[in-house]
Image: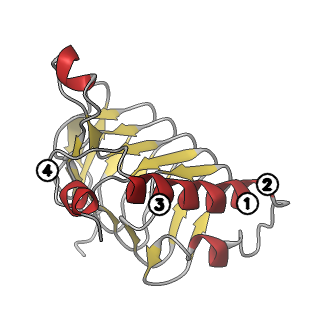
Amino acid sequence: MSREKEKMISGEIYDPTDLKLVLDRAYANKICTKYNKKSFNEINMRSRLLKKIIRASGNFWIKPPFFCDYGYNIEIGKNVMLNFGCVILDVCSVKIGDNTLIGPNSHIYTACHSLDACERMENREYGKPVSIGSNVWIGGNCVVLPGVSIGDNSIIGAGSVVTKDIPSNVVAVGNPCEVIKENGSLPV
């Protein structure tokens, strides 16, 4: 593993132009392109192809098109479903718990850039991991920002931008996403 890849995965500032990282992104892009171009099959949704890059502990369903940076930083639990058009920028760990549903056109970001324009021009990035619990439902067109955790059994309303941690067993909506009520789901 290259030093830049180690730094990327651990959330340190790294150089995304590192040859190992460029090749890793190219491989993930090749898998996603192949996945997205094949004729759609509702039965298995070609999950075997995505298992080449994504770590999964059980059955999962991802409806194409699907895009990710690397894939190897994505860990998916059992019975997870990502609907059409999901994007995961996985420079750091993205963990998605069992029985979680993610609506169409939702995006999960771990990639971060400097607020300073000069530093951004130096090809330096860093990341913050994202954790999504079990039995979570994220509505369509949501964005989950770097460093966010969403607790078990929570619901994120469609169109929300999740900018901070969301606890377990709540319904949260909006931009920025805020808790509006207790969910009352069974604890995991």
- Local SS, label 3: helix
Mark number displayed over residue 12: 4
Q: Extreme front residue here?
A: 19
Which of discs 2 and 3 lies nearer the camera? The answer is 3
* Circles 2 and 4: CB atoms closer than 8 Å: no
Across and down, in percent, residue 117 comes to 22, 15
Give coordinates of residue 146: x percent, y percent. 24, 43
Which element carries disc 2, helix, strand or loop?
helix
Quarter of the view holding residue 161: top left
Local crowd at mark 3 within 10 Å, few (<14), some, or many (≥20)? some
Residue hosting label 2: 37
Coordinates of residue 81 in the picture (x, y in percent) = 54, 63
Give the residue number, with chain letter if any, for mark 1: 34
The image shows residue 177, relative to residue 38, as above or below, that is above
Q: Are marks 1 and 2 in contact (CB under 8 Å)?
A: yes
Task: Give the number of the disc on residue 24.
Answer: 3
Give the residue drawn at x 45%, y 51%. 22
User: Is residue 78 rendered to the left or right of residue 150?
Assistant: right
Q: Earlier in the sequence, mark 2 or mark 3?
A: 3
Q: CA distance from mark 2 to mark 4?
A: 35 Å
Kindly identify the amino acid type of the residue bearing the numbered disc 3: Asp
Residue at 67% over, 49% down = 65
Label pair 1/4, CB-CB below 8 angstroms: no
Of marks 3 and 1, the one in the foreground: 3
Q: Amino acid at mark 1?
A: Lys
Chain-order first, disc 2 or disc 4: 4
Q: Is label 1 or label 4 in front?
A: 4
Look at the image and tell me whether residue 82 can be seen: no
Q: Marks 1 and 4, Cα distance to the nearest angstrom?
A: 31 Å
Secondary element at image label 1: helix
**Which of marks 3 and 4 precedes in the sequence?**
4
